[in-house]
Image (cartoon, helix red, strand yellow):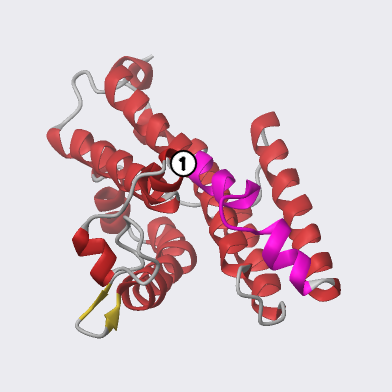
């Protein structure tokens, strides 16, 4: 049964940081829309780089686990860890257009002609009149996140077959605190006025909550080495 558990110091700090950012988002979102879009959540600002940092932290965490706890682990375990390591590394790179603006790198011909912002990233591509950001990174991702955060944790607790499958592929199961944080942040972002940069803040919430999930999921034992589980 899912229930709230005592937080570690790291978790407490990250949840507190989320609360501060959420409070500032709501304040500036309702009192100063210009400041919100041009300063608080500006492009290449603290919010965007914060998202990059936390996504990168998840990737690094997975690669550390791959090299420290993979002894005697099955192939599916290693592939699961590797998959999430690469996935979040990709997300981190996309967030800052793979360092293009940081290093002043000009986009290639393909991205110049197909990227809505003329940048070197995939989430702003428009192919055949279809905006990938809307189709894949918004609609499809929202559906996947809803299933992952709101449905899978309860199925994991109820059905042994699903539990076995989830653990086999090393998929971290969200705690109740993670689900609550996701819902609260989603509600507040949704009720904010029509701000062009509010979804950048939501991406930061996404990155922090997922770092919390990967640090301390319900099934944290999936990350332990064979020697640790036997002792």
- Asked whether residue 6 appears in the rendered view, the answer is no
Q: Quadrant of the C terminus?
A: top left
Residue 86, quarter of the rendered image? top left
Residue at 53% across, 48% down: 51
| Residue that sits furthest to the bottom in the current view | 129
Percent x, y for residue 170? 30, 42
Residue 39, quarter of the rendered image? bottom right
Percent x, y for residue 213? 50, 46
Percent x, y for residue 72? 18, 20
In front of the other: 136 or 151 = 136
Magenta region includes residue 159: no
Percent x, y for residue 40? 72, 57
Residue at 31% across, 21% down: 69
Q: Which residues are magenta?
A: 33-54
Dominant SS of magenta comes to helix
Residue at 29% across, 54% down: 107
Residue located beneath label 1 in the image: 102
């Amino acid at each position: 049964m899912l229930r709230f558990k005592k937080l570690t110091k790291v978790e407490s700090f990250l949840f507190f940081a989320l609360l501060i950012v959420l409070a500032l988002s709501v304040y500036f979102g309702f009192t100063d829309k210009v400041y919100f879009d041009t300063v608080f959540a500006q492009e290449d600002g603290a919010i965007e780089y914060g998202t990059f940092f936390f996504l990168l932290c998840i990737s690094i965490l997975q690669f550390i686990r791959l090299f420290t706890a993979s002894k005697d682990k099955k192939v599916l375990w290693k592939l699961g860890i590797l998959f999430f390591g690469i996935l979040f590394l990709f997300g981190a790179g996309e967030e800052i257009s793979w360092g293009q603006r940081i290093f002043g790198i000009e986009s290639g011909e393909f991205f110049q002609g197909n990227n809505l912002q003329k940048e070197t990233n995939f989430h702003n591509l428009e192919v055949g009149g279809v905006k990938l950001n809307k189709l894949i990174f918004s609609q499809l991702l929202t559906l996947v996140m809803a299933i992952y955060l709101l449905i899978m944790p309860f199925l994991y607790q109820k059905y042994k077959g699903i539990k076995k499958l989830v653990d086999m592929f090393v998929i971290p199961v969200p705690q109740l605190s993670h689900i609550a944080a996701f819902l609260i942040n989603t509600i507040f972002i949704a009720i904010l006025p029509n701000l062009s940069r509010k979804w950048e803040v939501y991406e930061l919430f996404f990155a922090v909550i997922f770092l919390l999930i990967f640090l301390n999921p319900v099934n944290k034992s999936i990350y332990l080495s064979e020697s640790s589980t036997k002792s």
